Image (cartoon, coloured by chain):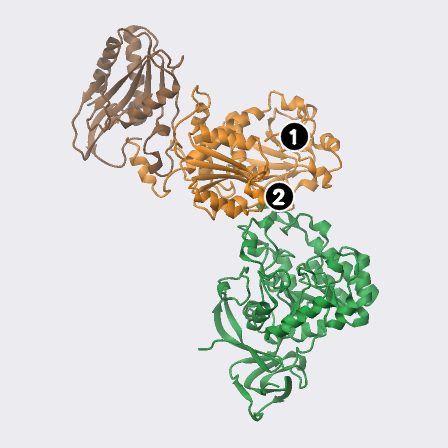
Chain colours: A green, B brown, C orange
Amino acid sequence: MSRPLLIRGGRVVDPSQSVDDLRDVLVVDGVVAQIGNGIDPPEGAREIDARGLVVTPGLIDVHVHLREPGGEHRETIATGAKAAAAGGFTAVCAMPNTDPVVDDPAGVGFVIAQGAAAGAARVYPLGAISVGQEGKQLAAIGEMFEAGAVGITDDGNPVMDSGLMRRALDYAQAFGIPVADHPEDLGLSGAGVMNEGVVATRLGLHGKPNASEDVHIVRDLMLADLTGGRIHLQHVSTAYGVEAIRRAKTRGVRVTAEATPHHLLLTEERVEGFDTDAKMNPPLRASVDREAVREGLADGTLDVFASDHAPHHYDEKEQAFADAPNGIVGLETALGLGLTYLVGEGLIDLATLIQRMSVGPAEAFGLPGGTLVPGSAGDVTIINLDEAWTVDRDGFLSKSRNTPFHGWDLKGRACYTIVGGAVVWEADRS
Amino acid sequence: MDEQAVHRAVARMARELVEQNEGPENLALLGIHRRGVQIADLIRSEIERAEDVTVPSGSLDITLYRDDLMAIGPRPVIGATVLPEGGVDETAVVIVDDVLFTGRTVRAALNELMDWGRPSRVSLCVLVDRGGREFPIQPNVVGRVITVLPHQAVEVSVADLDGRWGVDIVPFSSEAEA
Amino acid sequence: MKQPNASLGKDLVGLETLSAEQILTVLNTAEPFKEISERRIKKVPVLRGKTIVNLFFEASTRTLVSFEFAEKRLSADTVNISSSGSSVAKGETLVDTARNLEAMRIDMVVVRHGSSGAAKFLAERIPSNVINAGDGSHEHPTQALLDMLTIRDHFGKIEGLKVCLVGDILHSRVARSNIFGLLTLGAEVAVCGPKTLLPLGIAELGVTVFSRIEEAVQWADVLNVLRLQLERMEAGYLPSLREYNQVWGVSQARLDQAPKDLLILHPGPMNRGVEIDSDVADGPHAMILQQVTNGVAVRMAVLYLLSGGAPDTAEAAKEGAEV
């Protein structure tokens, strides 16, 4: 086993145990051994001087596309896991919409093996809901669970058949894993490529109405209510959707939901000029929706801050807007954006952001980690809140460069990412 | 030249044109946009008064035929091009301009005229010949020959555009007529 | 009186970003070009030696022919590339196609593409002048310019006129360019059509919305009747062409209810008996063929204005005038 690791003198922010104080953290044999003051280093321990830094449970991004297998020119599991580590994440959930789709235990095993080989952030696979993500026949959910899948989703392809969705929610309960849904009614989206509204009208781009998302959010909530299953709503972007989730939670529906950095920070105006790095699904919405998503994240309606990291090769985005694929990379910018614009501007405090990035996602998908309680996984992120830096997409460890945040000035960045007690990423502090 | 001098010169130019053409029949006057048009009008009324005939006339804007169009920046405004009534085929066309300098304008005007049809004869009539030719082009009828220094320009004023008739020698400036 | 003479810059992507002076410069420049098409020899040497590529990713007859006439009457050398049978159909991307053309040292590209923003995309990536001949549902600036020229020919002005665009506004690049250009020139603009074919937020662009043609006819000085793409019915926007004609078709009977004679425009090609009835299309107030004639003049004007040298040498234009 690796050397013991003693993180000394940092400000430990661990929302899982309501800690925000100066503490030492000792990790031995890959698990948190002790948290307290004046811990003596065991024999041969590595010490990290964390004075002036923030020490948090390892951050978790439950929504990333690592593109392998089939899209290795955009990202591989190894490059994605390294980009995650560089962004302060100790674990990510890999979406199954690869080529081939991860819809069987072999696919799950492949992702786990590649993730382990990468030696960076942990990679937890999600399996598909339906075979080939075609929305017809349930995939081998039980076998995938046995192989290590932490949830199921047809992300990228909404589950249009409500009957299938109901059965997925029923079936998955045997394994205690959530059904994650990309809520979108394709009929309402039609040929839409951005938010429906005056910007789309002016640009001559077809719009997707909020209702295309809302209809499926409400449907999913109803089905979760009906089945008692666990629904996880991905990348919620609309005001109505946030409100529907809030009300469902008060009724006791088992729902968790995500907010992405881009839906929290950007609006449809960003599409002006046909910038394909502002093209994503769900689209950037109106400012009233952005405000609602912010409120939802602040009050806990949205449990998880997730990047929806979606790498695309530069020439795939180098097209006319309607022809370009959806999505942006986010692993290396999410934390800095959250610290600068959500915490820095006072929407939420630091502990809340860390909650939405650690214990929140861990609980949503039943993942180990997300806490520094002794005995839990030795996954730790150490953050320098004072580091000012500028997003430079050419410096990304991700293979892809598609970000609308290039050139943004941010404050706050991970400086150590520790997985199982081993430092998998360390900022150049020279 | 003051207004009187211009009118005297124009009267003589009109007579010479008719004389060279052995009569006013078949003549058509084409003024080059912009001041050439005014001078052509003056000559036409002079001929019509003296000969009691109607002389067809028109105007041409040579902008699209310039040889320096690719070198100059945003495009000049194009004036109207009006063919004489009855066209130019088999007529004795007189190209009228205010000042003859390098000859490039006349070269352009000849090219444009050729695209209009086939005149039986083309002659050139200018109010002022200031020398400095860069093309083998000579006028058939001249109001006055004026020798000017390289840094000087000849400025022709016409009543419709400038409020008076006259010819002046002025220091060369970028405000040369368009 | 000072003639408007504003540079258009490198490209003509749309009318949304043009000033009134820029639009008027094009309309005024089109006037002398009308005459050239009436000559026996319909050609001036102004673009001699210029190479222009008409890059049409979507089928078009009218616009392509109009541009080609305009180019040839200005003595440019032209090459037409259409999507079928070209490398475009073989999977080459828009930007690769453009760069390949650029490598052959072309001067201008006239582009028609099915995706909104494609013309701007191209303009930002190649040094040649780019003229948008229609990009998706975004803009079709030369069509709107020729529509405005036709309106001005008739009324002597644009400002203060009431122009109603009728039909499929949602998918129409002609509608957007007309809305932007007409509003900039001070006209009042309305749209009229089934709500399934009106984009959300259209009123926020500053236009009046009529849901029934009867109301539009009472209000307007000009009706610009848009072509109804027949595939809209299959996509479920409309019950049937017959119903469309019954409810929104521009018929003589409807025009007879108008308080004044309305000028009728149509960008073509027409679906007679669908959006416009033959008695209107062939009637005395239809300017449809005049639009086609003006189209060549407007496109000549745009080609002429864009083909200029460095835009920062405005003074040189005046100096150079003494040739």
Q: Is residue B61 above or below residue A351?
A: above
Query: Picture coordinates of residue A94 (x, y %)?
Result: 66, 67
Based on the displayed image, in which of its 4 quarters is residue C292 positioned? top right
Residue position for label 1: C218
Q: Are marks 2 and 1 on the same chain?
A: yes
Image point (30%, 19%), residue name: B95
Q: Is residue C281 above or below residue A110?
A: above
Q: Is residue C80 above or below residue A214?
A: above
Secondary element under disc 1, as helix, strand or loop, is: helix
Look at the image and tell me whether residue A413 can be seen: yes
What residue type is disc 1 on? Gln
Image point (47%, 48%), residue name: C124
Q: Is residue A192 above or below residue B175?
A: below
Residue position for label 2: C203
What residue type is disc 2 on? Ala
Who is closer to the viewer here, C145 or A243?
A: C145
Query: Picture coordinates of residue C302 (x, y %)?
Result: 46, 35
Give the CA separation, mark 2 to mark 1: 19 Å
Secondary element under disc 2, as helix, strand or loop, is: helix
Based on the displayed image, in which of its 4 quarters is residue C233 positioned? top right
